[in-house]
Amino acid sequence: MAWDGVSVEVLASLERYRLQPRRTHAAAIRGERLSPRKGLSIEFADYRHYVPGDDLRHLDWNILARLDRAYLRTYQDEQELPVHLVLDCSASMAFGEPTKFDAARSLAACLGYIGLISGDAIYPTALHHQPSEARPLRGRAAFTRLVEWLRTRQPDGRHLAASLQRFAHANLPTGMVFILTDGLDEQFPDALRALSGRRHEVVLLHILSEAELDPDLEGDLRLIDAETGEAIDITATSGVLQEYQRRLKAHNEAIQQACRRIGAMYVPVRNTQPPQAVVIRELYARGVVGV
């Protein structure tokens, strides 16, 4: 079944929320977020003493006339927040019901909607074997373009870790980064560390299916890797399933540890969770979104 976006009711439930970065990020243009840096927008902030070279247009002539002292008006600088929606397009994301990829797209649409109605700049990026050029979307009207971008992505790639490293080294504005992925790449924890020097605020939404977390298997089976096509024959005994659970837990803990090392937020998500529930219950509780 083709992904059909998110409903009007879901979007309506998100109207009161906005993304909450922990720190100010430099942006290319002014937006709707107030920065502690003094700038030249229309919001008055404070006075300071005039120093040679200052712009005389901001001199307060009334104070100069009354006190014979030169003061400048300063203003709050308004900035837009760059928000990167980083979508894992590896073939393993096609697993589950609904697929992890559809769950990721719905969650990306919700996050993008919150950002667009708040005046943030949304940069959608696909983690794919082909480089994906991120072009910013701005304003509520751009939501239809975001949905169309999400609809036309397909989970058919490989090399998740390499794609993430390529994103980490791209010349993009620093901001909030939401990585929507199943993390099923042995090199993925190492690739996360490549983001450490870019000063992004990273939120990792680790999406796994119910069948991956608690497989209900028995008997003789042939498992086929969705990305490499390699097959392996197994007998699904209790011992085999316990070993699978041990390895999955170790891999997930390695991802969590990598997140801690770079100061990223780790959020586990099941493919069956409604996207608005993830936003309102999980991200709101962690302070990633607010009202």
Image (spheres, helix red, strand yellow):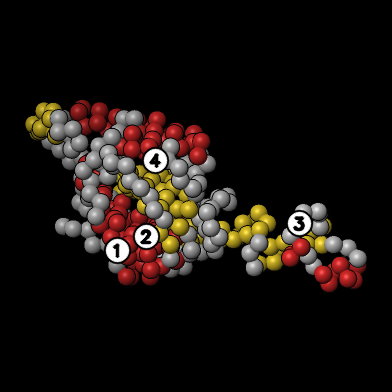
Please name which of the two marks, 1 or 3, marks the residue nearer to the observer: 3
Q: CA distance from mark 4 to mark 1?
A: 27 Å
Amino acid marked by disc 2: Cys
Badge 1 or badge 3: first in the primary sequence: 1
Q: What residue did someone put label 4 on?
A: 167
- Measured from the top left, where is residue 148 in percent x and y? 28, 60
Q: What residue did someone put label 1 on?
A: 6
Report helix, strand or loop for mark 4.
Answer: helix
User: Dots 3 and 4: beta carbons under 8 Å?
Assistant: no
Q: What residue did someone put label 3 on?
A: 54
Q: CA distance from mark 1 to mark 3?
A: 51 Å
Amino acid marked by disc 1: Val
Q: Residue at x 88, y 71 (%)?
A: 65
Which quarter of the image is occupied by the N terminus? bottom left
Badge 4 or badge 1: first in the primary sequence: 1
Please name which of the two marks, 4 or 2, marks the residue nearer to the observer: 4
Amino acid marked by disc 3: Asp
User: Dots 1 and 2: beta carbons under 8 Å?
Assistant: yes
Residues packed near mark 3 inside 10 Å, few (<14), some (14 to 19) or many (20 plus)? few
Q: Residue at x 38, y 68 (%)?
A: 141
Residues packed near mark 2 inside 10 Å, few (<14), some (14 to 19) or many (20 plus)? many
Please name which of the two marks, 4 or 1, marks the residue nearer to the observer: 4
